[in-house]
Structures are given as C-alpha cells and as structure tokens.
Amino acid sequence: MTTKRMPTTTSSEYTLCHKCGFNHKIIARRIELMGLDNHDKHRIQILSVEVFQSQSDTIIDKFYEFLLQQSEMKKFLPSEELLVRLKRTQSEYLARFGVEFKSKNYFEYRLRIGIAHARIQLPLNLYIASFLQIQTLLQKAVLNSSLSENPELVTDCYVTISRIIMLDISLAIDSYIHSTMHSLSSSVEKLEHQNDSLADQLMHDSLTGVLSRAYILDILHKQLGQIQRDAGHVLSLVLLDIDHFKSINDQYGHLVGDKVLQQFCKTVQSAIRQQDYFGRYGGEEFLLLINDDKPDNALILVERIRIMIEKHIYMIDSHDIKFTISLGFTMIKSGDTIEKLLQRVDSALYKAKAAGRNKIIRA
C-alpha cells in the first residue's frame, strides 16, 4: 500500500466545505486547535512507509472484528459482500490517513465520508467509537513495527495519530451537524407545505374550490366586528340555493350533480367583484357577502347572477342542464349577530322558494 494523494477538487466542488462554513482561515484555525504542524506531516509519511504499508490488512481485519462484536453494528454490516467493499474503503482511508491534512481537499473528503455515514443513520457515538478503535489499532501497529526501536519516535507517532484522529472526529461531528440541520430544514419545509395544504383545505371547499363554510363564517364574523367599529361600513348577505337540485341528482346521478355545483360556482365567481366573498354553506346552499355601500348596487349584482343562471345551459357529460336559483337577501346592520343574519337570509330564502322559486326576497 502506497501513500495516496488527496483527489484534486476544483473550487466550485467544495460544496460541503462551503455549506459547513470552512474557508481557508477556518481550516487553518482548526488545524491549529488540533496541534497539527509540519512535524506531523513528516511523521505521517514515516507511518505510511513503516507501518501502514505492511500492516494495513491486519489493522483492517482487527477493526472489523471489533465492529462485528458490537450488536448495534450488525444491521449496518448485513452481508459478506458489503463487508468486503467496506474493507476496501477502509484501506483507502489508511492510504490517505492524514495526507495533506491542511488542504481544503482533505476537509471536503472527510466531510463527504461523514455525510455518507450520517445518511445511513449510523449513530454518531458508534462512528466516533470506530475512530477511537482505529487509533488504538494504529498505535499498536507502531509498536509492532521497526519504529519501536526508537521510543521517542514512537511517542511522536502516537501524538500524530491522535491528532489526525481528533481532526477526523471533529469533521465527522461537523458533517453530522450539517446532515441534521439539512434534515430539520427539509422537515420544516415539509411541515410548512403540509400546513399550507391544511390551511387551503380549511379555507376552501374541496368540491367547488370556493370558500369553505367555516372560513366564510369567520370572514362574516370579522366583518360584523368592523361594522360595530365603523357605522359607514355597509355589507349585504345573500343565501343562494339551487332550485330542485335533488331532481338533478336523481335524474343524472351524483357525479353530474357535483359538476353542476362546480359550474354554478364558476358562474357566480365570474360575476362578483374582488371585494366580495363567496362560499359554500352546505349542500347546494351558498353564502355571498357583498361589500358595497349602496344596497341597490348589491341587489343589481344579485339579480344579474340570478338571470345568468336562469339563461345559462350547462353542458355536462353530454347533458344539457338548465336550472334556476332562489336567493334570500339582507343588509347587515349594527348590532347584528351571525345567528340573526343567518336566520334572516334563511327566512327570506324560504319565502323565495314558497313564492315559486327563481326569485330574490329581501329581508
């Protein structure tokens, strides 16, 4: 086994270094904190020639023997084939052990390895334990080499091995932090998307896409509060009901009935203004909240909607369907409650139906 140089990486490829905040200044500071210097660089060359090249296979076999004894590691080493591949990877690690440790290439390489372990959800404590086991095996290998004849050099090599291992552990922790933060960020984005989706479901009727019952009643509640504060704020409330809708369902089926509701809503939405609110109250009944300080304008709008529906022929699943609507209309007054308003428009709607349908009754 020969000492391998770190693979060359272009500046645009330092993705993890950039994401983890490693620039040249911070890398230099990390190296300084680990106590690494040019003496360590020289000792790494000695270790490669005198220890790693001759004892690599033995070190790796003992390392995986240790891992296989750990019950938590068994699920990460499920097959002999995978074990062979991992041993080759570990051989690469020893060949590159500490090589060019001051370079951005080295930091990028170690961060990528750490991210790979984080992605397979290897617990960080086991990952760190594996580094410490490698440290022990490397230091024992030094004693089993020709270097053992020089006690001072053995001590120096022990220190260098410890420093490189600590550097690698620190980068492993950085990579796990990055992976965790990325996972949390993705989870937050997913939750925000789910919240947006849930909010949309709460705001809109799932069949017709108009405002839901809960949401339009909430808007009505807020508008009532504004009227209490501002007597000049004028609103009208309309309850619309499709005449003989049950007959449409009975004659054409509920799927066609659903499409009738959808097309009806599109017609109403095409007629109202941006400041008006339209929502499904229940079944074939809908609420329309009109923002206009002139009651006559509101009535003109409602009459226009009634005529549009009356004259329109809906082409649905090869059926020509015509229908009319009945409407209860009321002006919102200071002191009104939602209950009073709904009772008034419901009573007006009942009178419109009793009077022959396809009518607007004002309460």
Image (cartoon, grey):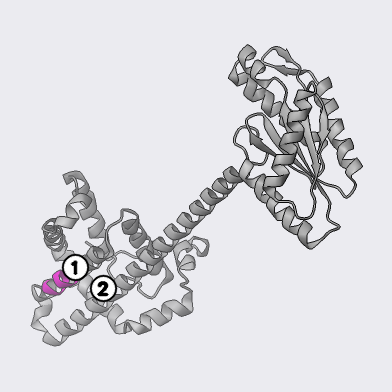
Mark found first going from the N terminus, 1 or 2: 1
Label 1's element? helix
Instruction: Give the residue displayed 23% in from the left and 53% down from the top.
Output: 86
Q: CA distance from mark 1 to mark 2?
A: 8 Å
* Amino acid type for the residue under numbered disc 1: Ile
The residue beneath circle 2 is 165
The question of residue 228 being in magenta is answered with no
* Amino acid type for the residue under numbered disc 2: Ile
- The number of discs equals 2
Label 2's element? helix
Question: In front here: 197 or 327?
Answer: 327
Q: Quadrant of the N terminus?
A: bottom left
The residue beneath circle 1 is 134
Q: Quadrant of residue 146?
A: bottom left
Q: Where does residue 58 sit, x and y in percent of width and height? A: 11, 61
When the figure is inspected, residue 46 is found, relative to residue 303, above or below; the finding is below
Q: Please provide the residue range marked out in magenta.
A: 135-140
The question of residue 139 being in magenta is answered with yes
When the figure is inspected, residue 301 is found, relative to residue 31, above or below; the finding is above
Judged from this view, the residue extending furthest toward the bottom is 152
Q: Is residue 161 left or right of residue 172?
A: left
Q: Where does residue 277 sit, x and y in percent of width and height? A: 74, 44
Using the rendered image of the protein, determine whether residue 295 is visible from the camera's viewpoint: yes
Do the residues under discs 1 and 2 have CB atoms within 8 angstroms?
Answer: yes
Q: Within 10 angstroms of label 2, few (less than 14), some, or many (20 or more) residues? A: many
